[in-house]
Amino acid sequence: MAIQCLILGAGQEVGKSCVVAMIGGKKIMFDCGMHMGFSDHRAFPDFSLLSSNDISCVVITHFHLDHIGALPYFTEVCGYNGPIYMTYPTKALAPLMLEDYRKILVDRRGLEEQYTYENIIHCMNKVIPIDIKQTIQVDKDLQIRAYYAGHVLGAAMIYAQVGEEKMLYTGDYNMTPDRHLGAAQIDRLSLDLLITESTYATTVRDSKYSREREFLKAVHTCVAAGGKVLIPTFALGRAQELCILLDDYWERMNINVPIYFSAGLTIQANMYYKMLIGWTSQKIKDSYTVRNPFDFKHVCPFERSMINLPGPCVLFATPGMISGGFSLEVFKQWAPSDKNLIAIPGYCVAGTIGHKLMSGKPTRIDLDKDTLIDVRCQIHQLTFSPHTDSKGIMDLVEFLSPKHVILVHGEKPKMAALKQRIESELGIQCEYPANNETVLVPTTQSLKISASKTFVRNCTTELDGDERIAEGILVMEKGHNAKIVSEEEFLETIGAERNVVSFTGWMSPLAQ
Amino acid sequence: MSKYRDASYQLRLLCTVPPSRSLLTCSASPLSSLMEEEGSLVQPLTTTCNPNPLFQFDLTSLSSAQALLLNPSTSIDTIHSTVDSLLLSLPHLSTNATSLSLALSVLAQSAPRHPSLSQSIVSSVRSLINGQDRTSSAVLSALLSIATSCHNEDGSSILTSILDEDLVLSLASSGVYKIRSRILRLLVFVVGRWKCSGKFLTDEVMVRVFLRFTGDIYPILRRDAIDGLCEFLTVARDGVDFCVPECCLERAIGLIGDDDEFVRVAAVRMVGLCGEMLGEKENGVDKIGQMDTIFTQICSMARDMSVKVRIEAFNALGKVKLVSDAVLMQSLSKKILGSKNGGKSIIKLDKASKPCAAGAYIHGIEDEFYVVRKSACRSLGIHAVMSIKFADDSINYLMDLMNDDSESVRLEALDSLFRMTAQGCLNVQEKHMHMFLGLLTDMSSLVRHGARKILQLMKLPKLEIFKSTVNELIANLEKYPEEEEGIFFSLFSLGKNHREFSLNVAKDLAKQIKRTSKGDLTFAKPSMAATLVVCIASPLSENENVPDTPVVLFSYAVPLLGRISRALQGTFDQHFLLTFLLDHSNIKWKSQDLMPEIASKGISEDLMQSVIKFISKSVGDAWSLIKGSNGNDAEKFLRSCMKELEIISLNASQAAITTLDFFSKYIQILQLISKIQCKFDSRNSTTFHIKSHHILLEKLDSALRKIRYSFTGWTKEVECHILELSLLVDVFTFSLARIPSNEHLKNLLSKISHLEAISCLSDFTKEIKRLIEERSSVMVNLHSLLKVFECSGLEFVREMKPIKAELKVVGDDSENPLTFVPGLPAGIRLWITLHNTSSTDRLWLHMSVRGRRPQYVFLDLSNFEGSEEVRKCSSLIPFYKTPKIASFEIRVCIVIECLSEHYEVLKERDGPKYDVTELSVEKLVYFSSVKSR
């Protein structure tokens, strides 16, 4: 028996996560994402490699576009009709993300849309929401269960089981809690296969406290000197985490500088956070009894006209990575002043302005052939990341101790290094296939064996010191179930008698 | 009670059913029926019945037996008979396991209520223990509940009496889960009381049994077995051979990877315990190596998915001592540390163990659950105290934890830092100070307190840091003035610990004082007081730096005596402090000015007197400021005097309070005079606001009236002084009026003649008299008049008694107002207490409703009971003019008529003829109309 894994996306790259696993004859699609770096056919996984009717179910781990972006295309255009599972927050937030992206694609970049608004709505209507640790019986044989993954609101790791074959697809996860989300949590499962992300396959991050301290210090010094701080983030996740951090700090240090959220998606996202408080960290849940921690005290909405107002402020603007939209607009205005600060939290995809800023400080950026931006502002790079680091991956692999590991969602050379470590330190077989490759993972099969009464009795009575050793004979006959019997019974069945051969040795004392 | 009665009544009813058949012969007969006449009818059961397989208990009779046994009013005889019947029937029940276990549970329940029966119950059930599986498990559970319900050692001695090694071993190896679990629980119970009872198992066998159970298939038994071992190790701590903890350790390490959460928790706890014990024992093994292994093993559990395991793991980490630096350092770094920096001194660790320890503490302090973070923080602190290298690194994390969102974690981190400071292994760096000093303005007072506690012991490396710390403490003081005591003490300790730095600060301060003109420095500013505390700390505590510390600082510290000595309570006696400051200041004083020897704690009467004397002197000094037209300085000076008085009066005796009260009233007068004088000065140059002068003069006048009529028992000197003051007021009024009325003049003259009468004519009075006689303008000579005014009488302020009154309104508060019918008089029941009033005093009750004319009621002192010192009276006072509104409030207070005021003003038709001054605090009386109720 084996689990067959087809990597449709995120193989040796970050983007368009999509893995189709055939376990016990059932095909499950984990995630159905798109690649943000491409706008042609490469943006979506190559669905032509499978027939959509073979798939038993689609499970989405979280609402990031590189995990869900291709779902409406798959269901509405490719015609997949089976069940789709995702957690409640993902179901709530996914349509916002999808629609937002579709708008940007069509309205701003003037590209052809791959699916319409109606497609999104129609697709989301098919979704079956699941809860953490809720076991879903997809069909007679296939069970799936979601575990808390941290990362973003509603992120889940998906456990799937058919018969004796078990596997876990982690999606993106975080092993260290942050200010608003908890750490990933999982039970001890004896897995045949673990498919884990490996964004930070070789990075070991130091304590988050020092990162927080540096960030706060940078922001505080900037606003104290009258500068403006731009924090380009995606609407969900980092924005809330950093905001909690800043709001707390503002409160404690009694600072009166306004913190702005660029209107629209972020405000709406905060509303969802307020509602989905059960999916946040323990601390937020505890303090919820007193007040909703997402009702920020120092935060107010931002108007476009306020960009050039004098005086210090902190602004959270979408999208992250300064890949366009409002954050780019603000960046153009603020970058030329050396008083201002751009704080870039987390990972930036190559090709975005964020990436350029992070990889060495440029003095000017050519936006297009007509637009040049002078960059004189300070740049603070934050290593806040909702992904686990290599220590976290190793810890999870060690905790679960599966028989096989497949790495996805990472960069090839780093994945190779991690594979090396997993194989040498933990002795677990590990692979990191490229896109559209198929991996066969052998699984062990267990067999039910019945035991005879005499054997069981012998087991409980024949005790040998601290060890319990029971001796028996395994009988496997064609057409019958395997059975374990005691020696006497066996002799009886085959009608043989017990013969004892004893040897007597003699040794001469002189034979030394 | 009634419930209980019902129950016993029902029982009686049950008991009244006539006996028909023997208990066991028929299943239908209720046991209770046998108990009608308690005791006599209960037959020994075996005598009446054969061991017939047919007979059995039915549930009804069992429950009746239970009711009888549990009912507190059942007689002893009945209980004995019931128990005997049950016991006798037990062997016959052995075939019916259900009935047997029920009967046993009834017996077990009754045992704690009747301890005398326990032994007999236990010995009779002993024989059943080897029976069927279900029987023996029922017996064991009965034994367990009997044993646990017994007091003290009885429980285990009962068990000791019936258990022996063979029995225990055979039960422990039973194939039935229930039997195993119960014998295990019995053993765990016994081992907890191992020392105080006889042993039926040797230590070795006991440990072996437990060890065997740790491999049981049921997780709950594994957990219980580990708990038992832990119990054994704790109880027999010193008595055990070191191979026992070693053996336990080995087994526990094997179990920390268990699938069951609770087993892991118990296993981790045991690893910690064994580590602790092995660390204490001398056993010739390479101890550091062993401890390292244990430490890393526990570290590997720091990443467990269960919160409970993680908490236990960090608790256990704190117990393991003697860990090598290399491993400790590894636990602070997620990256695997190379051995390049250690050389030979680093013990070689086996390859697997090092990654386990990696970053354990980092994970701990980053944990999602604050309980884990707290526990990690505590154990981090424990290790930091023991290893300097580790301390240097861990301080980074402990300081970072000051940014934690949970207050209890911050407090725990502060606690760890405090312990490190106390042990002298806190090596603060500049980068930490920003975060740390931020704590002094934290929102939580506990955090602020914790931070100050650390500062008291901290050794600061640089002058800049020292200065910024002092500034931050001052910021703390400005933001939270209520914490002055603690802040002053921290400043004092800080100054004491950093002699050089504080000397530096002292010199700066002295320069600053020199630069500013005399009297410009404000004591009211908290920062000044705080800096002075830092400066005098090291000379005061060790008599060092005394010659170097500028003298002026000591004299500036004298007026702050009250505040400083409160902060240093328990360290320095206030008297010592005062003597010290005066000795080193440039204030001239004689030691007999202050009382000679005082050793009593707190502020003694003598000390109080000397303080008062000192204050009266300072007040005298204020006059010179007023005369010198230094109005602003005088005002600041008086304000700080006022503050001092407030602080001193907190500790003062009743007699001293009167004097202090006098002084505070006196200072108020001085403040007003100083203000008026300022106005008069400015009047010469600018336009003059006659209205504001009149207001001030009016205030001054009423303040003087108050001081004159609030005290009795004046000395001549004081009386003269007060009269002179009122003369001064008249002079002010006189000069303000430009064309003084005859009324004023008459008033002035009468006062002068009064002064003449008591033969107390000062230069000031004489001068006024001369001026009036010469008919020259007082105004012109105001300055010269002021110059001759002397303040001398205050030294004689002694033996004064306060004239005061207390008012209590009966049955009224804002929640439950009195009722009234609008337009009709309403009565107010009042309790009045008067102190030190003479029979010639005219007292009135002043009642007023906002915006209306007040109503006065004369208080006839003859209606009061008691002597001059205290008079008491309760009376119903009518209030006539109730307004026609739904509710209102009346302000009530007692006033005294100032009879010696020489001009008569008709204030009210039915009220006092002279000016009045208040004797009591104003009370509010609430009324609501009957209709609105």
Image (cartoon, grey):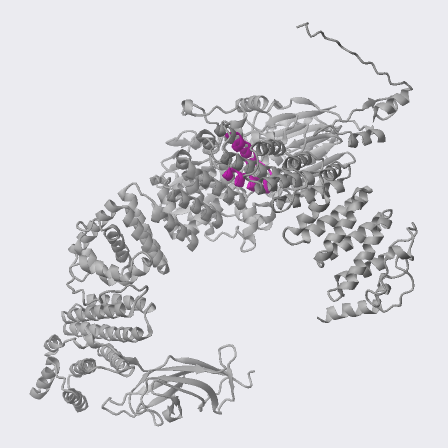
**Is residue B649 shown left or right of residue B2?**
left
Disc tally is 0
- Residue at coordinates 31% horizontally, 57% vertically from top-left? B568
- Residue at coordinates 26% horizontally, 54% vertically from top-left? B531
Q: Which quarter of the image is occupied by the N terminus of chain B?
A: bottom right
Q: Is residue B15 above or below residue A67?
A: below
The range drawn in magenta is B292-319
Give the quadrant of residue B899. bottom left
**In the depicted view, which residue is nearer to us: A420 or B611?**
B611
Q: Is residue A120 above or below residue B289?
A: below
Give the quadrant of residue B572. bottom left
Whole-percent x and y of residue B328?
A: 46, 32
Pick out the residue farthest to the left. Answer: B774
Secondary structure that dominates the magenta span:
helix
Q: Specify whether residue A452 is in view.
A: no
**Is residue B299 shown left or right of residue B746?**
right
